[in-house]
Image (tube, rainbow, N blue to C red):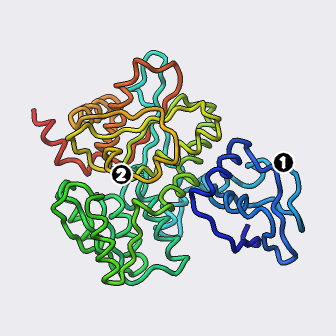
Amino acid sequence: IEFVKSDVFYKLSDLLSVAGDILRQGGVVKSIGVDDALRVVEGHEVFHALKLLGVRRVPISRGRSKEVYVPLETLGFYDDVACPGLRVFDNTVELLYKNWPTPLFKLRSLSRRGLTVWAKWEAYNPFSWSIKDRVGWYMFTKALEEGRVSQLLYEATSTNTGMTLAAMAAIHGVRARLYLPSTAQKSSDVWLKTLGAEVVRVSKPLTVDFVGDVEREAARDGAIHLNQFENDRNFEVHLKYTAKELDLQLRHTGVFPRAIIGGLGTSGHMSALSFYFKNRYRGSVKIYGVQPAVGHVIPGIRRIETGMKWVHLVELDGVVDITREDAVNAAIEVARKDGILIGLSSGAVASAFLKIADRLEEGHYILIFPDNGLKYAEIYSTYVKD
Ligand code: PLP
């Protein structure tokens, strides 16, 4: 793909219909026309949609496009999501992106009468032990490739994206300033400062409430503001990796999922999972989003009406409201039956499954668990006193 170049650029929203066609067809039905210098002359949108979906190769023909059918597998669609070898890495960034897929495992605690529950555990990421490593890494790496990274980086974060960006900044000798909401756990400051970042505590409960201030301060100080809430790399990384690797894991295991359930924060991961699975399996996989009940704080997730970008580009089959107590109780149930300590937003996802389980058809259900429970010791401590 590196030898084929196109100087036409598209916005994410413009490419989604072509990318959706490719996923539904399971391949490409027309080659991309190139000139003698291997520059695209016809089929730019197919070329960019394939780049967005992440393939190693593209089908080309000299001059005009031609009718062909090339399956995604032939294009190396899955090649980047399988961990090579014995988990020996050259550096800590490889420890992130060459160590995927994150594990997928059956949960005994939540499986019941004909419903088999699987968790994809994103705590298996090295910088923030969370799903946000994918986003922080991809936004930073792409900005670096585009020559947009300066000496300073500012970001509003509820902790996890901040940890990844602090790590990426440390690795690349950049100074990070991270703005945390009042609701983030006290120890976040310690983790971020230990990673070398400056921490600014804002007296507002939600990151989205002060992202505009961060944008202005970054512009004033000449800092790069990657802005996880608006940056399409957030959606893209989950399309290229999170969704695709889950698909590969399920195919390999011979499991067809009835539904995927996950939390909504920026909406990056659940929107990409919805786009991918709805197109690839023509609507037969249901997607449920999870948000905190009105008046409840669950770090990492928030209510749709607080404003999120990508969820409006895709289809959700339902949104489940969960209270903080229910999230903690579900996390405790998983801990005491399956022996794993999951995070609070993971607990919300587990609780959402339990809440809708009675209505679900027999089959396999996938829960996305964004991080682990160690970060939430302060919150869990008030529930496990006796
Ligand atoms: N859960 C946790 C712990 C998170 O940190 C986040 C995002 O920050 C989410 C869930 C939500 O993920 P997304 O931003 O992809 O919607």
Which residue occupies 36% across, 36% down? Answer: 349
| Residue at mark 1 | 69
Which residue occupies 12% across, 40% down? Answer: 382
Amino acid type, mark 2:
Gly
Neighbours of disc 2 within 10 Å: few (<14), some (14-19), many (20+): some
Precedes in sequence: disc 1 or disc 2 = 1
Amino acid type, mark 1:
Tyr
Q: Give x and y (percent) for residue 187.
A: 19, 59
Which residue occupies 21% across, 56% down? Answer: 184
Q: Is residue 106 above or below residue 274?
A: above
205 to the left or right of 274:
left
Quarter of the C terminus within the rendering:
top left
Which residue occupies 43% across, 41% down? Answer: 368
Q: Give x and y (percent) for residue 264.
A: 38, 45
| Residue at mark 2 | 307
Quarter of the N terminus within the rendering:
bottom right
Labels 1 and 2 touching (C-beta < 8 A): no
Q: Which of labels 1 and 2 is toward the front?
A: 2
The residues tagged by marks 1 and 2 sit, at their Cα atoms, a distance apart of 40 Å
Secondary structure of residue under mark 1: strand
Neighbours of disc 1 within 10 Å: few (<14), some (14-19), many (20+): some
Q: Give x and y (percent) for residue 245.
A: 58, 47
* Nearer to us in this view, 369 or 31: 31
